[in-house]
Amino acid sequence: MSGAAFHIARARHHDLPEAAALYSRVAKATLHWLPPGGFEPEVFLEQARFETVWLAWEHGRIVGLAALYEPDSFLHSLYVDFALQGRGIGLALLNTVAAAAEGPLSLKVEEQNVRARRFYAREGFSERETGTSDGSRWILLSR
């Protein structure tokens, strides 16, 4: 899949350390109310062993990522470099994951992550349930 100046491709094993660094950097800054320890690159790499990961590339570097846990059609991660947000990269990643999912796509979003909640609402996701993990409230979305 292509965009204006970026393209989407399935991650190869040797791409994952760079993807993990992007994940850690964006997650720590975006989800600043959560303890940062859960967003270390090693956490992403461990989870990626069980997921299919797609990457957005621009000028030879990773600028976004999405990870799908295929057995549940669950979007586990969707992160885009701050400087490039608003250019359609997240939507392209979301559409790639949705096309690969076997069933309706679902995901959890932090209640405080208003920007992500607006993005998913625009893309047709609706709330299914809420819960709390580690003192933080999340919302399960699906479409």
Image (spheres, helix red, strand yellow):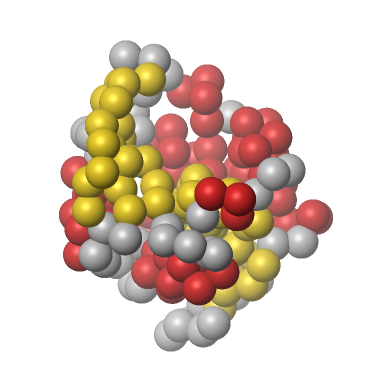
Residue closest to the eye, 98 or 5: 98
Answer yes or no: is residue 106 visible: yes
Quadrant the C terminus occupies: bottom left
The residue positioned 32% from the left and 41% from the top of the image is 140
The residue positioned 30% from the left and 48% from the top of the image is 141
Task: Provide residue 123's location: percent of width, then percent of height.
Answer: 26, 66
Figure quadrant of residue 48:
top right
The residue positioned 22% from the left and 46% from the top of the image is 127
Answer yes or no: is residue 81 visible: no
Residue closest to the eye, 57 or 123: 123
Please identify the residue farthest to the top as the structure is shown. 135
Give the left or right position of residue 31, taking residue 26 as reference. Answer: left
Residue closest to the eye, 55 or 77: 77
Figure quadrant of residue 47:
top right
Task: Provide residue 136's location: percent of width, then percent of height.
Answer: 30, 21
Q: Is residue 113 above or below residue 62?
A: above
Task: Provide residue 134's location: percent of width, then percent of height.
Answer: 39, 15
Quadrant the N terminus occupies: bottom right
Q: Is residue 18 above or below residue 47?
A: below
Please identify the residue farthest to the right as the structure is shown. 14
The residue positioned 42% from the left and 61% from the top of the image is 104
Give the left or right position of residue 11, taking residue 73 as reference. Answer: right
